[in-house]
Image (cartoon, rainbow, N blue to C red):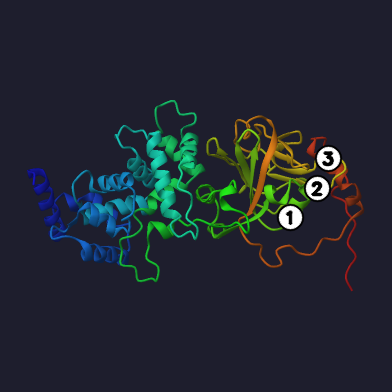
């Protein structure tokens, strides 16, 4: 044993029992202040149960302590190195400090810890290979409980890394760029944080671990082969990280054009009014992209929706585009209109949509628009030919979510004409605020 290693273990031992030495310095004292008394006691009990005679953990024991025995070599080495601060064993104090920063700290502190895991050379940059390997590893952990094992390929992880590094002038991802990217697509950050979730003696029925904290929706394909669909479990892991927890339970495939045909009428019959959905489109050039519609698809002659909606691209690179706040043209659904556009769309304006699939389900368009933050078309060209369309329900509708239809007005007879003028930016009707008083009920 080297002199420095022996001295570090002595300091750890003395600090552990007597509260002296570097292990009980200000950093440790600040870290324990973030835990409750019960949390700290549970963590210490778990550590005591598995520690060695040196009162520290070697790497295999450390990984077993965190229920990460099957973690791939890259992340296992990086996690142990960062937590142990480059030493050959992990002390209780080092574990507390790491957990405090990663799980109890600010968003910036947590991101900094995760960034250090990926910054292999400690150059302040995360390389493409690190992003690919870490994405694949975290997704594998998160998908551990899926009834059907996901296909073991990394093309989706390559696309994820390509999207993260897009526009970076340096030979990697800086911390600020990593932080910005993680806010748009938090799946990897959440997955890395979850690595330190286990390790306490949990009194509950389900022990904390990376596998059960990073929840991923179960994909219900029906009678359609999962390998033929655009949405893989890994892409679902990425996209669901932006959604509320209640939309990370079960996703149901409502429409798949290769089975149901390229028919807008069929699409509306299967999708209309169901709930929030994830729409995916593949063009003839092989690009895969789409949008999350936060409100149900319903015939509506004007834009609707809310700020939860977003656009995305999955291939050839992964990117998410959130609302810019410039306008509220979130989603559009035109069905059987004589004058208004028929089809489904997101953002932009008529004739210059951020994403639009027309009523034939054969053609579409995508442009840079003001509504969302995409600076280029999602598709290979601004006008594209549709290859595949699929739509996933991300949350089952609540009972009586849609109330009875409202009473009509004579003004509704010309609703389509007014909406066409509004979509084209031709002004509003001065009579819009004047409607018949509904008859009183007896």
Residue bearing mark 2: 335
Q: Position of residue 309 (x, y in %)?
A: 62, 47
Given this view, does label 3 or label 1 mark the residue nearer the observer? 1
- Disc 2 element: loop
Which numbered circle lies on residue 272? 1
- Disc 3 element: helix
Which numbered circle lies on residue 80? none
Q: Quadrant of residue 325?
A: top right
**Image position of 2 with respect to 249: above or below:** above
Give the class, few, some or many, for how many residues have Cα within 10 Å of label 1's Cα (few <14, many ≥20).
some
Between marks 3 and 1, how big is the CA–CA gap? 22 Å
Between marks 2 and 1, how big is the CA–CA gap? 10 Å
Query: Marks 1 and 2: in contact by CB < 8 Å?
Result: yes
**Image position of 257 with respect to 393: above or below:** above
Give the class, few, some or many, for how many residues have Cα within 10 Å of label 3's Cα (few <14, many ≥20).
some
Query: Marks 3 and 2: in contact by CB < 8 Å?
Result: no
Between marks 2 and 3, how big is the CA–CA gap? 14 Å
Residue bearing mark 3: 420
- Disc 1 element: loop
Residue 120, can we see it?
yes
Residue at the limit of the structure toward the bottom, as seen here: 442
Residue 106, can we see it?
no
**Number of marks in the image?**
3
């Amino acid at each position: 044993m080297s002199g420095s290693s022996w001295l570090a273990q002595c300091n750890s031992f003395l600090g552990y029992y007597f509260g002296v030495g570097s292990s009980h310095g200000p950093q440790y004292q600040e870290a324990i202040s973030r835990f409750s008394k019960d949390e700290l006691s549970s963590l210490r009990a778990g550590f005591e149960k598995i520690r060695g005679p040196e009162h520290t953990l070697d790497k295999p024991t450390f990984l077993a302590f965190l229920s990460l025995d099957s973690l791939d070599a890259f992340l296992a080495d990086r996690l142990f190195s960062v937590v142990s601060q480059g030493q050959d064993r992990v002390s209780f104090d080092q574990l507390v400090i790491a957990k405090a920063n990663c799980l109890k700290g600010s968003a910036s502190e947590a991101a900094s810890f995760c960034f250090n895991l990926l910054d292999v050379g400690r150059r302040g940059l995360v390389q493409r290979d690190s992003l690919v390997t870490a994405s694949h590893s975290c997704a594998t952990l998160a998908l551990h409980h899926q009834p059907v094992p996901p296909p073991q390929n990394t093309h989706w992880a390559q696309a994820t890394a390509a999207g993260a590094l897009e526009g970076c002038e340096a030979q990697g991802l800086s911390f600020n760029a990593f932080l910005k990217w993680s806010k748009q697509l938090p799946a990897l950050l959440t997955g890395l944080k979850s690595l330190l979730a286990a390790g306490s003696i949990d009194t509950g029925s389900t022990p904390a671990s990376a596998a059960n904290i990073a929840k991923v929706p179960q994909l219900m394909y029906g009678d359609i082969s999962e390998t033929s669909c655009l949405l893989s479990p890994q892409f679902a892991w990425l996209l669901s990280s932006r959604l509320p927890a209640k939309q990370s339970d079960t996703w149901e495939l409502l429409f798949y054009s290769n089975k149901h045909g390229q028919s807008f009428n069929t699409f509306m019959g299967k999708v209309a009014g169901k709930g929030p959905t994830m729409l995916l489109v593949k063009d003839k050039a092989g690009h895969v992209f789409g949008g999350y519609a936060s409100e149900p698809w319903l015939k509506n002659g004007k834009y609707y929706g809310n700020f939860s909606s977003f656009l995305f691209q999955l291939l050839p690179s992964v990117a998410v585009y959130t609302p810019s706040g410039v306008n509220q043209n979130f989603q559009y659904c035109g069905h059987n209109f004589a004058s208004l556009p028929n089809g489904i769309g997101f953002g932009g304006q008529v004739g210059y949509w951020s994403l639009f699939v027309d009523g034939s389900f054969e053609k579409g368009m995508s442009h840079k628009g003001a509504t969302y933050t995409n600076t280029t078309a999602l598709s290979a060209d601004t006008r594209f030919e549709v290859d595949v369309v699929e739509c996933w329900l991300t949350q089952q509708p609540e009972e009586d979510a849609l109330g009875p239809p409202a009473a009509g007005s004579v003004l509704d007879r010309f609703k389509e004409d007014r909406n066409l003028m509004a979509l084209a930016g031709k002004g509003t009707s001065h009579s819009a605020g004047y409607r018949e008083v509904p008859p009183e009920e007896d």
